[in-house]
């Protein structure tokens, strides 16, 4: 008998499992709106032109070698990533109060930040929004933090439960960590307004709550990198401390290259140096040092003003296509006279629409229309095209009628 005979079969990941089910479906009209990856109008994955160009440059440069990076990754990439999220003129960067380490995309950055907090921060409770990206509770729990939730979304209004959010953060113990989606909240597509962010900031600072930003969609929500970084910059400009996990998966289409960064903004340069020395002790036994290829591509783009500009244009085009899919889907439901108020489809932002469809309706749409999505009714707008909108609208109409 196998020495592993006692191993029980684990359930499929709820998000990636959608793709597994999709791949098994032989129907030619099947549609995968489960996973959060951008698709072109033709339904194809997209490699940005600027990424292809940067990659070609790197490949042609025969002076480049494949030596190990330092534990903290590519120094140039780290500097440029901090500027991207905090702003080119950020006083925190100028005062050397920020330490940035290259990590394995957004997930790896969250994990390294969480392990650092579990080892060196006095409060081990992290508050995450309800609902949130399904991997958040797993990442934080396994890192040794204790996970609690704060109210975020109101199913009645399909908008922000702002009062619930304030009440829950107000009731949190002083010093607790709070996970905030920097923009384009996943799965709801609902973000606080700038005024609400300011109130959240004041409350958190007055209670000494520690912000941990997850920035997985910078530039993807509004089409502007600066606008989508406003929440983070608001918290940094008050001089207080925070953590930020950045991902280049979506905004540069670097999904499988696993490029991201963790930044910790500290009160002083002296603290930042000590924090970084401890981050190295977290990383070294975990994966030793990060991969060189993707970070080199990102750094090449960020440091060259022409390439950077080209990137912002391509990024805006992706964001605009998603926004236009929202309008098309909303119009298609209006045209069908589908019961209910669907205005949240055009109000929500970012990659996803939180449709309000329940698990039963989702199952119906999968069975009858071969449309795949997570059971919470979240659909990826990035996976839609002008061609597939009518099919989705038909399916939603049938599911709710
Ligand atoms: N945070 C959020 C909110 C996300 O939606 C995602 C990707 N789905 C991530 C983090 C991490 O993605 P990655 O590790 O691919 O950068």
Image (spheres, rainbow, N blue to C red):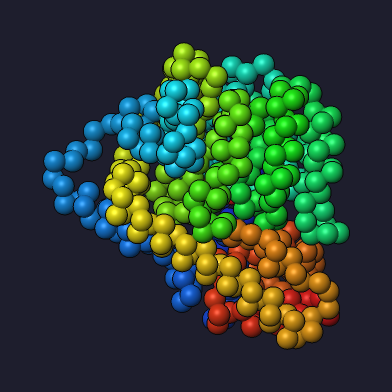
Using the image as rendered, state which of residue 329 and residue 309 is in the foreground.
309
Percent of width and height locating residue 320 = 52, 67
Determine which quarter of the picture holds residue 104: top left
Q: Does residue 339 lie above or below 232 as drawn?
A: below
Q: Does residue 108 lie above or below 190 as drawn?
A: above
Determine which quarter of the picture holds residue 141: top right
Q: Does residue 104 lie above or below 332 as drawn?
A: above
Work out which quarter of the rendered image holds the N terminus and state it.
top right
Seen at 81% across and 49% down, the residue is: 161
Seen at 37% across and 26% down, the residue is: 71
Percent of width and height locating residue 139 = 61, 36
Seen at 84% across and 29% down, the residue is: 171
- Residue 95 appears in the picture as rendered: yes
Seen at 48% across and 29% down, the residue is: 91
Percent of width and height locating residue 10 = 64, 46
Work out which quarter of the rendered image holds the C terminus and state it.
bottom right
Question: In this image, 292 relative to 31: left or right?
Answer: left
Percent of width and height locating residue 163 = 84, 43
Q: Residue furthest left?
A: 62
- Residue 398 appears in the picture as rendered: no
Determine which quarter of the picture holds residue 346: bottom right
Q: How many marks?
A: 0
């Amino acid at each position: 008998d196998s020495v592993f005979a006692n191993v029980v079969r684990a359930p499929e990941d709820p998000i990636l499992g959608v793709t597994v089910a999709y791949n098994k479906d032989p129907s030619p009209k099947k549609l995968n709106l489960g996973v959060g990856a951008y698709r072109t109008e033709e339904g194809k994955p997209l490699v940005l032109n600027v990424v292809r160009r940067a990659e070609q440059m790197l490949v042609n440069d025969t002076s480049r070698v494949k030596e190990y990076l330092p534990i903290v990754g590519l120094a140039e990439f780290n500097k440029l990533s901090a500027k991207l999220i905090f702003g080119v003129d950020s006083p925190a960067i100028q005062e050397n109060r920020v330490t940035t380490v290259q990590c394995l995309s957004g997930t790896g950055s969250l994990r390294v930040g969480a392990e650092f907090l579990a080892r060196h921060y006095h409060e081990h409770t992290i508050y995450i929004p309800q609902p949130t990206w399904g991997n958040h509770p797993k990442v934080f729990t396994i890192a040794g933090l204790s996970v609690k939730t704060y109210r975020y979304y109101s199913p009645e209004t399909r908008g922000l439960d702002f009062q619930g959010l304030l009440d829950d953060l107000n009731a949190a113990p002083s010093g607790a960590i709070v996970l905030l989606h920097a923009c384009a909240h996943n799965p709801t597509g609902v973000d606080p307004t700038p005024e609400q962010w300011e109130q959240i900031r004041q409350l958190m600072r007055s209670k000494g709550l520690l912000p941990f930003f997850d920035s997985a969609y910078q530039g993807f929500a509004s089409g502007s990198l600066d606008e989508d970084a406003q929440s983070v910059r608001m918290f940094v400009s008050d001089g207080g401390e925070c953590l930020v996990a950045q991902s280049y998966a979506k905004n540069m289409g670097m999904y499988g290259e696993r490029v991201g960064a963790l930044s910790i903004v500290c009160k002083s340069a002296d603290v930042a140096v000590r924090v970084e020395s401890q981050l190295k002790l977290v990383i070294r036994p975990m994966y030793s040092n990060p991969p060189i290829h993707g970070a080199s591509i990102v750094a090449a783009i960020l440091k060259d003003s022409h390439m950077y500009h080209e990137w912002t244009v391509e990024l805006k085009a992706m964001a605009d296509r998603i926004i236009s899919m929202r309008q098309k889907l909303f119009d298609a439901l209006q045209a069908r006279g589908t019961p209910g108020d669907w205005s949240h489809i055009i109000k929500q932002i970012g990659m996803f629409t939180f449709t309000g469809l329940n698990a039963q309706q989702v199952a119906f749409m999968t069975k009858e229309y071969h449309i795949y999505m997570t059971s919470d009714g979240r659909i990826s707008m990035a996976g839609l095209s002008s061609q597939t909108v009518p099919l989705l609208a038909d399916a939603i109409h049938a599911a709710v009628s």
